[in-house]
């Protein structure tokens, strides 16, 4: 309703104004979620500081939206918006990626002297925002990222980990929105802090195989012949082992902790990313710009790094976005089996494992963490699908 209301206010809806809307909604939603702590017996010592910062940021975003609606006409951005760009970029420290993108757009358009030349990544962003399901997925992902960061100030971590035998198995209420578990810990607070673990593990477990698989795939696709055969056959052996089985074996051998979990999830994903990069590099390596670079005497390392890899990023970005959701699901699955994050750490799989013992008496203990896992995986999938369509040159 808020998005529809803001959209109706302005007839000419540009990407800058749209990003302002989502930046405001993200910040305001974080404030509403954090405000639920007021019903608890006590709040974090930094609660008022965190809420004050969030309120100031939200007011700044609203003022920025007014200025954007006034000084952005089509592709033209007035220089008066330049002072707003740097605070918007710095606000990424709160996890609000919408504000960060807005700041980058303002700076990019002001640096672009020729107004008739389109900026490619801004055009991709415009196409992405035409897909409402993709934007919804993006909004939920950024909301959870921002909540994970801002919860350091507005949530008390002790409520999520300390036992409180006076509040054992409380039903959902204003004080405990998702109830309490068998140790009296607030499930709502545990899910908030669990988002941080799931997102961090899922992101790192995706970035590591992207880097390793990208390097192996680029070398294999560029040089081909014997080197390609050796690399790909070794990766085929690794690819033949089911990813979840390999992860269980690694965690069982080296112990259940966060680092081993990231390592286990990363190794199994390397072949998939290597195959994607290899296929893209093989189609690009014979193009004219690569031949021109060779004719100019550029070294192979320079050609791969500066010419081939930048032109191979689109399929990797799409696969990585979809892969994060799968990594989050694998993280929760292994934690549920007792082979992931340590049991005392609030993580969605750990929370769901406790709740599964109370499905008949206190089903909310399993329903809410289960819904959180479903929500984040669906969000990444919708966002990845929308990003794939936005990066597809055939759909421009």
Image (cartoon, rainbow, N blue to C red):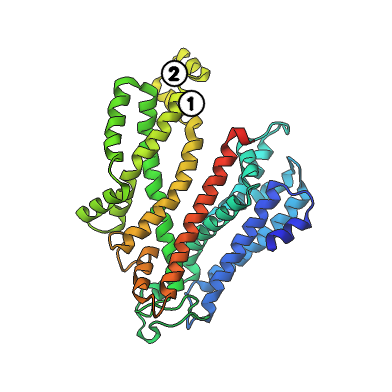
**Mark 1 or mark 2, earlier in chain:** 2
Which residue is nearer to you in this view: 70 or 337?
Answer: 337
Q: In this view, does 185 lie above or below 339?
A: below
Q: Do callouts 1 and 2 mark residues in contact (Cβ within 8 Å)?
A: yes
Callout 1: few (<14), some (14-19), or many (20+) C-alpha neighbours within 10 Å? Answer: some
Q: Which of the labelled discs sits on residue 161, or is there none?
A: none
Left or right of residue 227, residue 173 in this image? right
> Which residue, given by chain and number where applicable, does mark 1 sit on?
307
Q: In this view, does 174 lie above or below 210?
A: below
- Total labels: the figure holds 2
Q: In this view, does 239 lie above or below 48?
A: above
Residue in view at x 60 percent, y 52 percent = 133
Coordinates of residue 282 in the picture (x, y in percent): 43, 25
- Label 1, label 2: how far apart the Cα atoms are: 10 Å
Which residue is nearer to you in this view: 45 or 37?
Answer: 37
User: Which quadrant: the C terminus?
Assistant: top right
> Which residue, given by chain and number where applicable, does mark 2 sit on?
298
User: Which quadrant: the N terminus?
Assistant: bottom right
Residue in view at x 50 percent, y 30 percent = 311
Coordinates of residue 216 in the picture (x, y in percent): 35, 32
The image quarter containing residue 338 is bottom left
Q: Can residue 156 be seen in this view?
A: no
Left or right of residue 307, residue 257 in this image? left
Left or right of residue 183, residue 170 in this image? right
Q: Nearer the viewer, mark 1 or mark 2?
A: 1
Coordinates of residue 268 in the picture (x, y in percent): 32, 44
Residue in view at x 62 percent, y 36 percent = 395
């Amino acid at each position: 309703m808020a998005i529809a209301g803001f959209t109706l206010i302005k007839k000419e809806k540009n990407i800058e104004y749209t990003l302002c809307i989502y930046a405001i909604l993200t910040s305001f939603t974080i404030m509403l979620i954090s405000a639920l702590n007021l019903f608890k017996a006590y709040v974090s010592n930094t609660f008022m500081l965190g809420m004050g910062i969030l309120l100031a940021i939200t007011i700044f975003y609203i003022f920025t939206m007014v200025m954007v609606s006034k000084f952005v006409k089509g592709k033209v951005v007035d220089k008066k918006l330049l002072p707003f760009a740097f605070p918007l970029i710095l606000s990424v420290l709160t996890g609000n990626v919408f504000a960060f993108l807005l700041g980058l757009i303002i700076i990019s358009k002001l640096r672009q002297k020729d107004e008739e030349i389109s900026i490619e990544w801004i055009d991709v962003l415009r196409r992405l925002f035409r897909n409402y399901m993709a934007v919804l997925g993006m909004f939920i992902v950024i909301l959870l990222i921002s909540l994970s960061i801002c919860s350091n100030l507005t949530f008390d971590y002790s409520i999520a980990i300390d036992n409180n035998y006076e509040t054992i198995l409380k039903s959902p209420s204003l004080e405990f929105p998702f109830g309490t578990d068998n140790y009296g810990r607030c499930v709502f607070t545990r899910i908030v802090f669990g988002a941080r673990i799931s997102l961090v593990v899922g992101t790192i477990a995706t970035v590591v195989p992207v880097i390793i698989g990208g390097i192996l795939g680029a070398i294999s696709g560029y040089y081909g012949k014997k080197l390609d055969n050796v690399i790909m056959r070794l990766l085929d052996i690794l690819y033949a082992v089911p990813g979840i089985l390999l992860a269980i074996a690694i965690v069982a051998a080296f112990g259940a902790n966060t680092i081993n979990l990231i390592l286990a999830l990363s190794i199994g994903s390397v072949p998939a990313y290597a195959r994607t990069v290899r296929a893209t590099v093989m189609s690009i390596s014979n193009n004219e710009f690569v031949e021109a670079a060779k004719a100019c005497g550029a070294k192979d390392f320079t050609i791969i790094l500066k010419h081939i890899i930048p032109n191979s990023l689109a399929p990797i970005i799409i696969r990585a976005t979809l892969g994060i959701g799968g990594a989050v699901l694998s993280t929760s699955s292994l934690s549920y089996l007792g082979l992931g994050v340590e049991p005392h750490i609030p993580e969605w799989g750990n929370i769901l494992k406790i709740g599964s013992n109370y499905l008949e008496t206190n089903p909310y203990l399993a329903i809410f963490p289960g819904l959180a896992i479903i929500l984040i995986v669906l969000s990444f999938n919708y966002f990845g699908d929308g990003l794939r369509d936005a990066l597809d040159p055939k759909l421009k």
